[in-house]
Amino acid sequence: MGGSQCMKTKAIVLSLVCSTTLWFCLDLAVPQSGFTSGGKGRLVWSDEFDDDAIDRSAWNVITSINGGGNGEFQEYTDDGATVTVQNGRLAITPTLTTLPRKFLYNGTYDLGDCSDTWPGACKRTGTANFPLPGVRSGKVTTQGKFAFTYGVLEARLRPPRGDWLWPAFWLLPDDQKYGIWQRIWPRSGEIDLMEGRGNGVDWEMLGGDPNRRRLEEDPANWVYSTYGVNSFTSTVHCAGPGFKDDFDMVKRTRPPASLADDDGFLVFGLRWSEGRVRTYYVDSATGEEHTVVDWRGHDRRPNCRGAYDDAKTPLARYGAPYDVDFYVIFNLAVGGDCGGKDYYWGHDTPWAPANCPGKAAGLTSAACFLEAQDDWYPTWGDDNQLLVDWIRVWELPDGEAP
């Protein structure tokens, strides 16, 4: 590690647990190659993943079998092999479970020291129709350890390749000021800087509509071409009437050879000020930021505005729900039926009724996915990891109002 310096910063920008006067010891020898740092203020938090293992003072490694809220098919584990630091990078590596195959269909799996409080997230008995997860993967968060309001956030990462892999880099609110996330999501907000798909570049999503805004007469046959590993989406969620999801989502195609070393990494970023949330990616050859989503509190669609500006909501103010601390999440999910909907993966999947006849007899999507293992698992090669080279948070520059 290089030299370090302790600095003090305002609580509105950054917060750590059990601290009202905030001090941070920051490494000043931060590598600067491959990105442009213009338009940023003082660096206030970072992880360069320089150590041999993940820093447990900064990150929580999640354990859960609840499907991530989207009916996903993985177990999140802290087994020492799935979430690691390799060659100066955070690595999340999906693998097949080590549980016996028969156990998945009739065994009772108890995670013991589990980090998820959702019912069924820590202990469940597998059945023929609803087996235990056949895949292990990883999720890390800074909840309770680091969160911030307003500033610039960037991470340099490489999404994975492999069918039905679902990498994400995103933020959730630390204290659920506008409503508990699991119960009335997304009233308290969610910022997705990057969500991807590991399927090949020629994969087409059939019938799904991630924007949920049908623009053609035959939405069932809607085709999103080249929607695999070469593309990603970014989304800013908030609540509309009845606190239903209302959001701004944009799909982008990843630029090729985005860094000089041509190793597939890309910098994804967030510039967040009062009443504005802008996500982007960086062209590392030029340092140019390419805006993906630009959400502005003052011109939110009426649906989104309605949940926060009602006179009966005393907490509402300009920019809500993006006026509180949010924490950081990296995770690598696997598949998921989103409660039987096809928004994210479309309807040409191993767990779609047309491809899994057993669904008519009661098989769940998880069972269909497991039965199709011989089809998807061979696509998981050496590049199936989600890799994070670094993550950094800066204050907004002087003169840019929070």
Image (tube, rainbow, N blue to C red):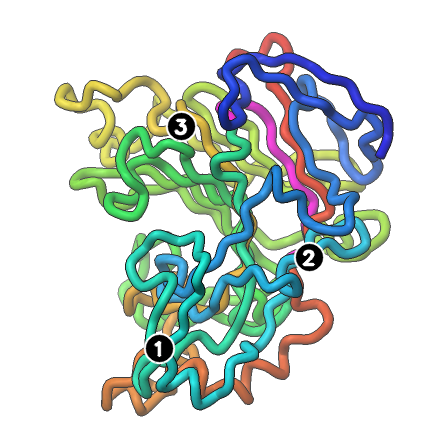
Q: Which mark is residue 163?
A: none
Query: Mark 1 Cα within 10 Å, few/some/many (few <14, many 20+)?
Result: many
Residue drawn at the location 43% of the way across and 85% of the way down: 103
Q: Which residues are magenta?
A: 148-159
Q: Secondary structure at mark 1?
A: helix
Q: Can you identify the residue that label 2 sits on? A: 84
Between the residue at mark 2 and the residue at mark 1, the CA separation in whole angstroms equals: 29 Å
Q: Earlier in the sequence, mark 2 or mark 1?
A: 2
Relative image position of residue 381 (x, y in whole percent): 69, 75
Within-10-Å neighbours for mark 2: few <14, some 14–19, many 20+: many
**Inter-mark Cα distance, 1 to 3:** 35 Å
Asked if residue 332 is positioned above or below residue 327 in the image, the reply reads below
Q: Which residue is mark 3?
A: 322
Q: Between 173 and 288, which is closer to the camera in this rendering?
A: 173
Three-letter amino acid code at disc 3?
Answer: Tyr
| Residue located beneath label 1 in the image | 365
Q: Amino acid at mark 2?
A: Thr
- Label 3, secondary structure: give it: loop
Pinpoint residue 301: horizontal percent, then vertical percent.
Answer: 29, 33
Asked if one can make out residue 160 in the rendered structure from this viewpoint, the answer is no
Residue 334 point in image, percent of width and height: 49, 67
Please tell me whether residue 242 is drawn above or below residue 74 in the rendered image: above
Q: Is residue 4 left or right of residue 10?
A: right
* 387 in magenta: no
Q: Residue at x 64, y 75 (%)?
A: 380
- Of badges 2 and 3, the one in the foreground is 2
Q: In percent of the image, x 84 and y 34: which residue is there?
A: 1
